[in-house]
Image (tube, helix red, strand yellow):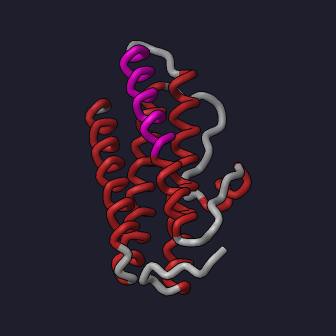
Amino acid sequence: MSKIDIGISETDREAIAGGLKKVLADSYTLYLQTHNFHWNVTGPQFRELHLMFEEHYNELALAVDDIAERIRTLGFTAPGTYRAFAELSSIEEVDGVPEASEMVRLLTHGHEQVVKTCRSVLRVAQDADDESTSALVSDRMRVHEKTAWMLRAMVQ
């Protein structure tokens, strides 16, 4: 592959890609968790939660592709295995099938965690004058903040 010359040093690109790998891992773990809950939710709010979880995992499916492609654009390989995601993610897997209200609480926490992971990458990208990553991460933060707000509103 030819040398990457996009105005961001290799050291900065590597640091940004490293942070994006964590965002990707968190996002993919949250995608799997949301899909699991979509399949297994029960109770009085079944229909509403089932449909909402489907909207969320569909949005996450598109997002992980954008994040992985940005990592590749920066010149690094994107993680793509469960093992790699488990090592990189700050979102813990859930054993079993929790009650619907616990699903909402866990997903709220997951979205908030992605925001925090994005926030740390945003600082690195801004310091490197990487507007493309900054925009991507900022957009992801906005989506996850709004989703967490909507989930919190369901249990109040």
Q: Quadrant of residue 2?
A: bottom right
Magenta span: chief secondary structure: helix
Q: Is residue 132 above or below residue 147?
A: below
- The residue positioned farthest toward the front in the image shown: 2
Q: Is residue 41 found left or right of 80 in the rendered image?
A: left
Viewer-nearest residue: 75 or 135: 75
- Looking at the picture, how far across and down is residue 116, in whole percent? 40, 62
- Looking at the picture, how far across and down is residue 10, in whole percent? 55, 84
Residue at horizontal 28 percent and vertical 37 percent from the top: 150
Q: How many marks?
A: 0
Q: Is residue 50 above or below residue 128?
A: above
Q: Is residue 156 above or below residue 29?
A: above
| Range of magenta residues | 45-62
- Quadrant location of the C terminus in the rendered image: top left
Q: Quadrant of residue 50?
A: top left
- Quadrant location of the N terminus in the rendered image: bottom right
Residue at horizontal 57 percent and vertical 64 percent from the top: 72
